[in-house]
Image (cartoon, rainbow, N blue to C red):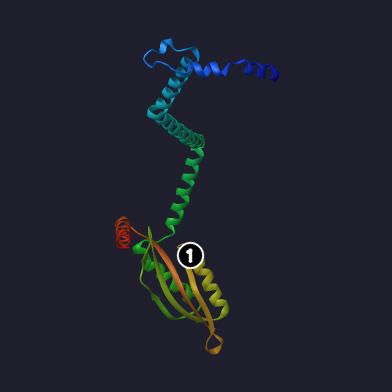
Amino acid sequence: MALKDRIERLRAIDFQALVEDFKGLDPNNPGQWPLAPRGAALVAVFAGIVALGWWFDWSEQMAELDQKTQEESRLKDEWLGKKRQAVNLAEYKRQLGEIDRQFGALLKQLPNRSEIESLLSDINQAGLGRGLQFELFKPGAEAAKDFYAELPIAIRVTGSYHDLGDFVSDVAQMSRIVTLNDMAIEAGKDGALKFDATAVTYRYLDEEEVAKARKDKSKDKAGK
């Protein structure tokens, strides 16, 4: 419909007659109202019903629908994540087995309590076997960790440069894990070198010791 036609129709409407239709309406007998007031009343009733429905019921339903939509999205993401894990389950099991194997191999390099004395003797013999003179060989106090304990050993030996190098190499190649920390070298008498270090060895804790270490750790956290 052209704009000109619409304008002509609006001009043809008798607005004065419409205004007169809304005057003197009997609220007790709406069935006798003219067409325009009845139509306006129906629109108003319909709008009121929609507003009341939204206020008392639909708004809650829309909020619940939004919540369910978000939950659906979350569950879909969880499902996709679990699906990816299920697809790669065989690879995950293989990797876990490899980790367990490597951990077991490392654990075997940690001596137990009965083997510590033998390990200390091996460190001492490694130095004596290279012609070094021990001025200090003093094990310190153990420090318990999650499943193992650290045992520091303060050592001071004197000897030639090459003998000291061979001693460090021998310690590094031991079947048990031993690290040399805080190393320092200074000149001694008759051209000999004095070597100070802290040798740290490790041992794994038995089940009773692990339980005690965890209990002590829990107490420390509770105290803080």
Q: Which residue: 52% across, 73% down?
A: 167
Q: Position of residue 31 (x, y in %)?
A: 41, 10
Q: Position of residue 209 (x, y in %)?
A: 31, 59
Q: Is residue 111 above or below residue 30?
A: below
The quarter in which the N terminus is drawn is top right
Position of 118 compared to 88: left or right?
Answer: left
Question: Which residue is at the front of the view, 170 or 7?
Answer: 7
Q: Amino acid at mark 1?
A: Met
**What secondary structure is marked by label 1?**
loop
Question: Which residue is at the front of the view, 170 or 91?
Answer: 91
Q: Position of residue 65 (x, y in %)?
A: 44, 30
The image shows a total of numbered marks equal to 1
Question: Which residue is at the front of the view, 19 or 222?
Answer: 19
Kindly indicate the quadrant of the structure image that contains residue 134. Answer: bottom left
Q: Position of residue 146 (x, y in %)?
A: 38, 58
Badge 1, how many Cα within 10 Å: few under 14, some, many 20+? some
Q: Which residue is mark 1?
A: 174
Q: Is residue 204 above or below residue 194?
A: above
The quarter in which the C terminus is drawn is bottom left
